[in-house]
Image (cartoon, grey):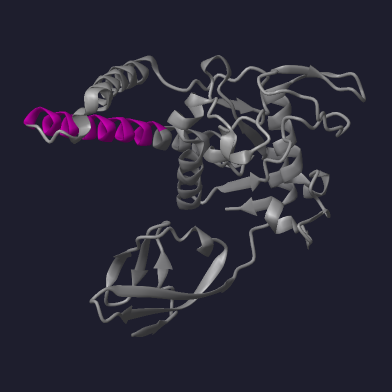
Amino acid sequence: MTFKQNHNRIDRINNYLMKVPYFGIVHTKRSMTHLKHKKIVEARIIKRPNGDFVLQVVTKFEKQKELSPKDRQKLVGLDINLAHNYFFQLSKEMKSSEKTWSKSVYEKYLVLDDKARRFQHYLTSKGHRFDGSRTTRRIKGQLAKVKARNANLLDAWQLQKAKEFSHKYPILAMEQLDSFTMRMSRRSKDYWLRKNTNHKLATFQPTSFRKMMEYIYQDEGHLLLEVDSYDTSKACNKCGKINEKLKVGEKEWTCPNCGQVLDRDFNASLNIKDWAQDITKHPKHDKTINGRKVKDSDLLLVF
């Protein structure tokens, strides 16, 4: 069955929900993030011999939003960091006042996390995970409930923070975040042997926070810009020199070219803001990677 696009009757609600005529809200197993900035032309629903239904979507690229001169003046840069129990660094102020958790939420999270650790220790010690006893089944059920409560706590906090940023900063620029690459150490030459050194990033899941920000900014009609995160903290905001010798964990460094003393996170937030205003300043601009020239649309997304 094929449905042609007519008066926006076919619409992507979020990454996993789509509105289709006659079928209503359709939930997909796979994420539909690849449909961003694309206009839906038609949708097909096909029934396979095994009884499963497959949703096929035909799309075409849609022009991204453009920033006006007034928007560029109001733009604020946001960097994700976890130094001194702070999660965000804004380009407006040197010391961010946006903490990771309120005290009550953080205490709840620690209590639940401690329970989960004790349950996990019981299951992994002496092979209890596979004994099939009544106690093991009960512990597994309790562990699943604790993990679900922690996930709900994290989702609620991310939603609250995303709404706060949308209300305070209607035009915001942030990094294109990837939790997997962010929490990997660069000390090992072999990619698959790198160790997870940043456990806070694994817990707070900045990628899911980025998706929450996209939903909120789109729903409220505000502008969210995502800049490629390549060398945001290594490039000097004063002269543009990239400090290749900057090590992981160094929060202050001196530019070898102009001699400026820079705060790593504040410098990154300024770079994110400047590159969002003028993408030609990005280190990857007009470069060729793996035989392909990098486009502006690869470096900057506007929601």
- State the image coordinates of residue 208 (x, y, percent, origin top left): 46, 41
The image quadrant of residue 11 is: bottom left
**Residue 33 among magenta residues:** no
In front of the other: 13 or 47? 47
Name the residue at 64% across, 61% down.
Answer: 64
Please identify the residue farthest to the left as the structure is shown: 134
Q: Is residue 47 above or below residue 79?
A: below
In front of the other: 131 or 144? 131
- State the image coordinates of residue 44 (x, y, percent, origin top left): 39, 80
* Residue 67 visible within the image: no
The image quadrant where one finds the N terminus is bottom left
Horizontally, residue 87 falls left or right of residue 125, namely right
Q: Which residues are magenta?
A: 134-157
- How would you classify the magenta stretch by its main secondary structure? helix
Name the residue at 28% across, 32% down.
Answer: 147
Horizontally, residue 20 falls left or right of residue 212, namely left
Q: Is residue 265 above or below residue 289?
A: above
